[in-house]
Amino acid sequence: MIKCNLGKVYDVAERLVDEIEETPTVYSISGDFDLLAQFSVHTTDDIGRFVNDKVQTIAGVANTKTIICFNAFTKDSGYHDDV
């Protein structure tokens, strides 16, 4: 999740999508943060260094909060009782 400086949400979102190849999707959100960005990184990558070097250095980023997702549960993948 990314908190942006005032007036910079669209600039930050555009740079995330255009400049970081590991960014498949960026959502604008409401609440304490302005953007929710999904990053797809290799399992051996240092997540802290990725966020520090690639995300927090974008002009207009004020704060970040990192959440690591383990599994996506969808109708076509994920957990099934009958398997």
Image (cartoon, helix red, strand yellow):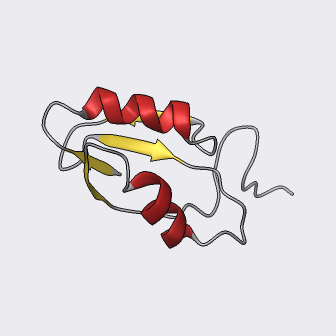
In the rendered structure, the answer to whether residue 7 lies left or right of residue 73 reads: left
Quadrant in which the C terminus appears = bottom right
Location of residue 15 in the rendering, given as x and y in whole percent from the top left corner: 44, 34
In the rendered structure, the answer to whether residue 73 lies left or right of residue 8 reads: right
In the rendered structure, the answer to whether residue 80 lies left or right of residue 73 reads: right
- Residue furthest to the right in view is 83
Q: Quarter-wise, where is residue 65 in the image?
A: bottom left
Location of residue 46 in the rendering, given as x and y in whole percent from the top left corner: 60, 72
Observer-nearest residue: 56 or 66? 56
Q: Quarter-wise, where is residue 26 in the image?
A: top left
Q: Quarter-wise, where is residue 80 in the image?
A: bottom right
Location of residue 81 in the rendering, given as x and y in whole percent from the top left corner: 76, 58
- Residue furthest to the left in view is 6
Question: Which residue is at a point 53% across and 30% down the rendered structure image?
Answer: 18
Location of residue 52 in the rendering, given as x and y in whole percent from the top left corner: 43, 65
Observer-nearest residue: 69 or 48? 48
How many labels, in total?
0
Question: Which residue is at a point 56% across and 42% down the rendered structure image?
Answer: 20
Question: Which residue is at a point 33% across and 40% down the rendered structure image?
Answer: 35
